[in-house]
Amino acid sequence: MTAISSRNVSLPELAKQTRRAAQQLAALSAEQRNQALEAIAQALEAATADIQAANRADREMAKVEQISPALYARLKLEGAKLTGAIAGARDVARLEDPIGQVQIQRRIDEGLVMRRLACPVGVLGIIFEARPDAVIQIASLAIKSGNGAIMKGGREAVRSCKAIVEAIQTGLRNCGVDPAAIQLLTSRSEIAELLKLDRDVDLIIPRGSNAFVQYVQNNTRIPVLGHADGICHLYLDASADGEKAAPIVLDAKSQYPAACNAIETLLVHESLVETLLPQVFKVLQQANIQLRCDERVRAALGKSYQLETATEEDWTTEYSDLILAVKVVDGLDEAIDHINFYGSHHTDCIVTEENEAAQQFFNRVDSAGVYQNCSTRFADGFRYGFGAEVGISTQKLPPRGPVGLEGLVTYKYQMVGDGHVAASYVGEEAKPFLHEDF
């Protein structure tokens, strides 16, 4: 059993240990896996002082290195944020067991039955940014779904991640589960090596920029579930309700600007520039949100508000900060075209009272999440009732959007017969198949 504080094995050997631990984990009952999650939660509570001390050390170093405000916000782990993350582990334990669910049960012939059952993926390799609370979410989902996990967090959070994983491994050990099921890598050089372990790692989940996700995809034979940029949009349609618009825009931008589901671009129907948009700007500037606007907005409102000039680069930038790009569009078609061209296929919203316009938006915007009259900040595994998430997939193939338990299981086919042979079902006297679901 390998503990991160005394790593004395190669990464390939560590991956093999994680695979063996994952196989044992997959064989446990749902009750045993839930007990493991409770043991993890208790160990994290017991280690709270050590985790917070490690996080303070990370933040002190982050200030020295002058990391961006967005990264610093993600790095901070204290008080309610840590308590909430630990509570999240217990929430995952209360979710329905994803393993062993019968998806199909079919009688092929009398005495010959086929079943398709959900089963764990195996070993997950997860690379994420400076968010130490993600370690708790990822580990909880991995244990619940019977998967092992090898994690690599951002260097900004290395002390916090170490303290958390040490506590998680203690919790697993306390309940008789091999702690090698949850592992942590601590150096950037290990990423390239991890991507080569296609015999023992079954799925890579990178959380970061489009460039980083593409690097991972181009440098591994392991399947990749990409969590890329969150360039989210909100479009104020001609029929937008003024009382709804400003609060939705404000929440979607400022409730947690460092999150990938915060909006980066506000699109505004041309008929609203001198009516509704000033109301929205007033609220945004009270919240100290910097506005980068196109010429049409600046020409109309530049004398009344402090507006910066938007460039082409602003339409493709994930600020993760209190900065919002604003553009006027002629109508719904232009808004949709802009979103599909510049967006990252994460989450996009329309504010409108016209259901037909909303339906057009839903049908034509090519994103994992499409919303009407609500903040994009709802694009979250916890808020969807998934308990937690390992990331938000912006690719088209499933799983898509917030990836919770159901995204961490695959399936296998079981066939039970009584001396049946395929030869009986071919030729002139071939037996017919029943193909009866039951």
Image (cartoon, rainbow, N blue to C red):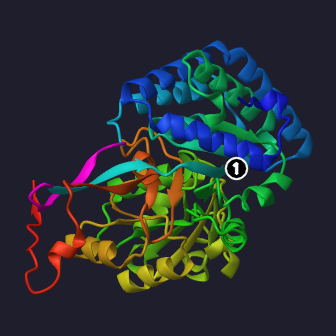
Asked whether, in this view, residue 2 is left or right of residue 266, the answer is right
Magenta-tinted stretch: 99-111
Quadrant where the N terminus is found in the figure: top right
Residue 237's x, y, as percent?
35, 72
Q: Is residue 193 left or right of residue 18?
A: right
**Residue closer to the observer: 350 or 41:** 41
The one nearer the camera, 389 or 193, is 193
Q: Residue at x 87, y 46 (%)?
A: 66
Quadrant of res 355: bottom left
As displayed, is residue 328 above or below residue 243? below
Asked which quadrant contains residue 336, the reply is bottom left
In terms of secondary structure, where does tag 1 sit?
Answer: loop
Q: At 84% from the left edge and 40% from the top edge, which residue is drawn? A: 62
Query: Mark 1 sits on what residue?
Result: 129
Q: Is residue 245 above or below residue 33?
A: below
Tell me the residue at 53%/40% (across/down). 23
* 385 sits to left or right of 23: left
Residue 347 as seen in the image, left or right of residue 213: left
Quarter holding residue 162: top right
What is the chief secondary structure element of the magenta stretch? strand
Residue 7 visible in the snapshot: yes
Q: Residue at x 69, y 77 (%)?
A: 313
Residue 166, x across and y down, in percent: 71, 26
Mark 1 closeness class: few <14, some 14–19, many ≥20 residues within 10 Å:
some
From this view, report whether residue 332 is shown above or below residue 11: below
Q: Using the rendered image of the protein, determine whether residue 69 is visible from the camera's viewpoint.
A: no
* Furthest-right residue in this view: 64
Question: For residue 108: magenta?
Answer: yes
Query: Where is residue 73 shown, x and y percent of the image?
Result: 69, 41
Could you tell me the amino acid type at mark 1? Answer: Glu
